[in-house]
Each structure stands twice: as structure tokens, then as C-alpha cells.
Image (tube, rainbow, N blue to C red):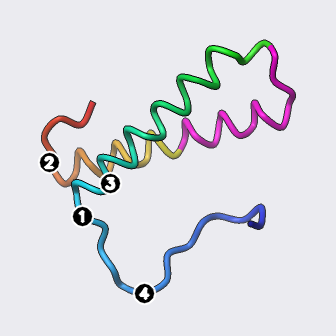
């Protein structure tokens, strides 16, 4: 994977349920990394920041779509 942004090719729309599941998975990874952040290197902390930014963007999309149970 390159250092660029992840691109989705085509016009496929991700279902609300799949997006919510993905968000919950990211939330679990983020919580795990956050618990161990003192032991992480700079590269890992940058990844933690990218995960957080992705979670914020997904939550915004879920809010726009008015998806129920989006924590």
C-alpha cells in the first residue's frame, strides 16, 4: 500500500450496515492502540492518528446518512 489516500474505484456504494461494521472495527483497533500508546513508536502514533481521522470521517458520513446506532 502506498502512502497516498485509499481510493475506491467504481461507483459502488457501501451499505450503511457495512460502513457501521467497519467503523466499529476501527474503533476497536483505535482503543487497542490507545491503551498501548506509550509503548509505540512515532510511525505507530501516526497510524493511530490516521485511524482516528478515518473514524471521524466515517462517523460524519453515518450522521449524514442518518444511520441508527452509530456510536
Question: Is residue 48 one of those drawn in magenta?
Answer: yes
Q: Is residue 38 above or below residue 45?
A: above
- Calculate the distance from the C-alpha at mark 4 to the C-alpha at mark 1: 15 Å
The residue that appears at 56% across and 73% down in the rendered structure is: 7
Question: Residue 49 sits in which quadrant?
Answer: top right
Task: Find residue 59 and report its horizontal and vertical position in percent.
Answer: 34, 42
Task: Find residue 35 and report its horizontal and vertical position in percent.
Answer: 62, 14
- Calculate the distance from the C-alpha at mark 4 to the C-alpha at mark 2: 24 Å
Q: Are marks 3 and 1 in contact (CB under 8 Å)?
A: yes
- Disc 4 or disc 2, which is closer to the eye? 4
Helix, strand or loop at label 4? It is loop
Task: Find disc 1 in the rendering and name its residue.
Answer: 15
- Calculate the distance from the C-alpha at mark 2 to the C-alpha at mark 3: 12 Å
What predominant SS class does the magenta segment belong to?
Answer: helix
- Disc 2 or disc 1, which is closer to the eye? 1
The residue that appears at 13% across and 40% down in the rendered structure is: 68
Task: Find residue 4 and report its horizontal and vertical position in percent.
Answer: 72, 65
- Earlier sequence position, callout 2 versus callout 1: 1
- Disc 2 or disc 3, which is closer to the eye? 3
Q: Are marks 2 and 1 in contact (CB under 8 Å)?
A: no
- Earlier sequence position, callout 4 versus callout 1: 4
Q: Quadrant of the N terminus?
A: bottom right
Task: Find disc 2 in the rendering and name its residue.
Answer: 66
Check residue 10 in the rendering and tell me which mark sits there, or answer none.
4
Q: Residues within 10 Å of mark 2 (few under 14, many from 20)?
A: few
Look at the image and give the residue range highlighted in magenta.
39-53
Task: Find disc 3 in the rendering and name its residue.
Answer: 19
Check residue 59 in the rendering and tell me which mark sits there, or answer none.
none
Helix, strand or loop at label 1? It is loop
Amino acid at each position: 500500500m502506498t502512502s497516498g489516500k485509499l481510493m475506491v474505484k467504481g461507483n459502488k456504494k457501501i451499505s450503511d450496515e457495512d460502513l457501521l461494521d467497519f467503523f466499529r472495527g476501527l474503533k476497536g483497533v483505535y482503543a487497542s492502540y490507545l491503551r498501548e500508546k506509550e509503548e509505540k513508536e512515532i510511525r505507530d502514533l501516526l497510524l493511530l492518528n490516521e485511524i482516528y481521522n478515518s473514524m471521524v470521517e466515517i462517523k460524519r458520513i453515518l450522521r449524514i446518512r442518518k444511520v441508527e446506532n452509530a456510536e
